[in-house]
């Protein structure tokens, strides 16, 4: 299982990537998996083991996203 974060638009995805790199957060941008219908063609992929770290960063840094999902890839 992987952690997938989706975004409403490309601007959100790029801002997320920038902030995560600045803060040393795990994961990377990937093309949106075909199993997911979301607003933009990008998603953040991280290990499910990093879910707590990612959700904590969302709260602390007010990162914007559409959904946080668990998905078998």
Image (cartoon, rainbow, N blue to C red):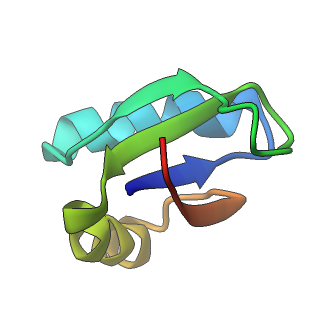
Confirm whether residue 16 shows in the render. no
| Residue 51 place in picture, x, y as percent | 31, 69
Nearest the viewer among 3 and 63 is 3
Query: Looking at the image, is 53 positioned above or below residue 13?
Result: below
Confirm whether residue 12 shows in the render. yes
| Residue 12 place in picture, x, y as percent | 64, 40
Query: Looking at the image, is 9 positioned above or below residue 37?
Result: above
| Outermost residue, front side | 72
| Residue 17 place in picture, x, y as percent | 41, 33
Query: Looking at the image, is 27 positioned above or below residue 72?
Result: above
53 lies left or right of 4: left
Nearest the viewer among 62 and 38 is 38
Picture quadrant where residue 26 is located: top left
Q: How many numbered circles are shown?
A: 0
| Outermost residue, left side | 24
Picture quadrant where residue 49 is located: bottom left
Query: Looking at the image, is 69 positioned above or below residue 27?
Result: below
| Residue 1 place in picture, x, y as percent | 38, 57
3 lies left or right of 69: left
Q: What residue is shown at x 75% (from left), y 42% (from top)? A: 35
Picture quadrant where residue 66 is located: bottom right
52 lies left or right of 4: left
Q: What residue is shown at x 60% (from left), y 58% (from top)? A: 64
Q: What residue is shown at x 65% (from left), y 48% (from top)? A: 6
């Amino acid at each position: 299982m992987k952690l997938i974060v989706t975004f409403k638009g490309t601007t959100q995805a790029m801002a997320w990537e920038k902030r995560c790199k600045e803060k040393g957060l795990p994961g990377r941008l990937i093309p949106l998996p075909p199993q997911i219908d979301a607003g933009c063609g990008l998603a953040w992929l991280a290990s499910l083991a990093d879910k707590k770290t990612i959700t904590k960063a969302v709260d602390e840094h007010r990162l914007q996203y559409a959904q946080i999902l668990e998905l078998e890839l």
